Image (spheres, rainbow, N blue to C red):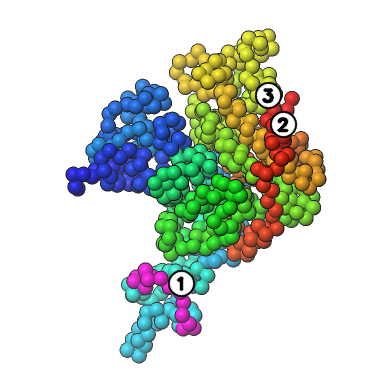
Amino acid sequence: MSSDTIKVTFLPSGKAIKVSPGVSILESAIAAGLGVKGLCGGKGLCGKCRVKAHYGVEQKISLSELEHLSQEDLDDGMVLACQRKLIADALIEIEPEAINPHRKESLTDAHKLMPVKSAVTKRYLTLPPPSLEDQASDLERIMREVSNGNSLEIGIELLKHLPAILRRSSYRVTAVFLDKSLIGIEEQDTSRDTYGIAFDIGTTTVAGSLVDLNAGRIIATRGATNYQQIFGADVISRIDYSITHENGAGLLQKGAMAAMDEIITGLTRESGITERQIYEAVLVGNTTMIHLFMGLEASFLARSPFVPVFSRALNLSNKDFGLGIHPAGNIHIFPSIAGFVGADTVAVMLATDIQKQPGISLVVDIGTNGEIVLAGKDRILTCSTAAGPAFEGAKILYGMRAVNGAIEGISIDEDVHPDVIGGGSPKGICGSGLIDAVAEMLRVGILDSRGRIADREALIGQVDPKTLDRIQEGKQGREFVLNKSISSSTDKSVMITQKDIRELQLGKGAICAGIRILLGELGLTPREIDRVFLAGAFGNYIKRDSAISIGLFPEIEADRIHPVGNAAGVGASMALASIDVRERATELTRKAEHIELSCRKDFQEEFLNALYFPV
Ligand code: FES
């Protein structure tokens, strides 16, 4: 190796890359196509980009590390990836996030069979070997069987490998077609092994479902952090990063691809299926995520009139992306409705069959953005609200994804009882836990309708002393400690701050106001809604009563709310299995009307009213 490069190896993947000395751990991980968590674009502010440095990094501890890492962490070799430079050959360990099997990004109907009409088809061929009497070329020999000798679309890579494949398999091969193109010739009969993968690229989390394209069945699902987070928590800050940083768009694309490849690796390991047996990927996600994955100019999405580069469905070759599926596979991009009502919303509409539901149906997909669909009176109205990332645990001091260690629910009686995913001591709180905690704090009087954490002196005699002791004054205002008796010196405190409550109010206020505006357009009241489909990664886990207590929905009865889990992933899987479903997706986008809330004068008033908690 030349003296001006060093080798950095990452665990647990074992991936290694050569970089110049002086590059940060974070930059080298991104260059290696690996994801590191983070929210502040490498500014040292969020403290989330923790990795373990075994050797090869500079020793100077930054102020940011002193703030975010404990002495025990530092002694253990933990560093912040954005703060440390590599100075010699290095070994870096990126801790994988432990996903609780019960809270994987599971789909409610994961094993339901879907109608199949796949774009990928296979045909087993027993070809006559060449002879002096039959000197047809290798390709001609195949074409005679599959297309009556008519020409087929075929790539150069396949032609290069064709002679060896045919001879190794004694001319018993399986032809793989993508629509009318021949994308593969495989040895022996592989016609039972035809798979695809459906991705829902969320701002915070990417979910992937591996689908058997013969059976129309979802085999396995997985989630991963969207590693773009390191460049900003929300879509606007990521668009901003893509514009203002050299190769910003390229880095954002790599961040999404790292999450997708991590999912592919996990799913293929779990199922024993190889990456080359995955011939197609269907992608849904909000419009910004899709643009950033494709490496497209996204700046016009952030500026009025919020125009995307494209909105119709597209079929692109994996040759242009290099995703870890079959190299000549198809990447099908779902159509979208508007700049902020994306392909994920279309997929949710498909999965909930919104067009065929009787009466009035409301779909609320809560992620970093909140997309709302109201269907009834032969119309489909859509809008998007800047829900803020609070529901996904971002911008919350102790916020985290719904993985092991996250508080997912809270009850308060004479004391506070957190419910921790995987059990044990909590490390933070996820969206469902936050909603539950706020609902309970409102119920016992610790929070008022304006969202202020009460002064503990004022509550003496009204609230149990143990609960009262959990209210404390922090650096940034009042806090409520969730996990321990505050006299304990061993457990790490997990708390909700006044700022966290404000973030939640902004998110739930935006969603509630959006619902009211759409209802107004159809001349309806909340009580006329027959059903609410609650989509989104944490829709299955929030307690409906808690969501109503905090005013996430306007005056809707709890039994009308139906969590539908990762409905966007289900819709994408349905479209992966059947090209007819893709047609339906396009029809839905034609029928849907988009209401742009930013130009509605009544939105601000509805929003301000909805910031309060119901009393
Ligand atoms: S502290 Fe490193 S990315 Fe935020």
Residue under the point 53% across and 32% down: 395
| Of pointers 3 and 2, the one earlier in the residue sequence | 3
Q: Which residue is label 3 attached to?
A: 450
Per the rendered image, the range of residues in magenta is 148-161
Ligand 1 within 8 angstroms of badge 1 C-beta: no
Q: Position of residue 316 (x, y in %)?
A: 49, 62
Q: Secondary structure at mark 2?
A: helix
Where, by quadrant of the figure, is residue 575 drawn?
bottom right
Asked whether, in this view, residue 73 is left or right of residue 3, the answer is right
Look at the picture and state if 396 lies above or below 295: above
Identified at 30% across, 43% down, the residue is 9
* Amino acid on which the number 1 mark rests in the picture: Leu
Residue underneath mark 1: 182
Q: Which residue is mark 2?
A: 609
SS for callout 1: strand
Q: Earlier in the sequence, mark 1 or mark 3?
A: 1
Marks 1/3: CA distance?
Answer: 63 Å
Q: Quadrant of residue 84?
A: top left
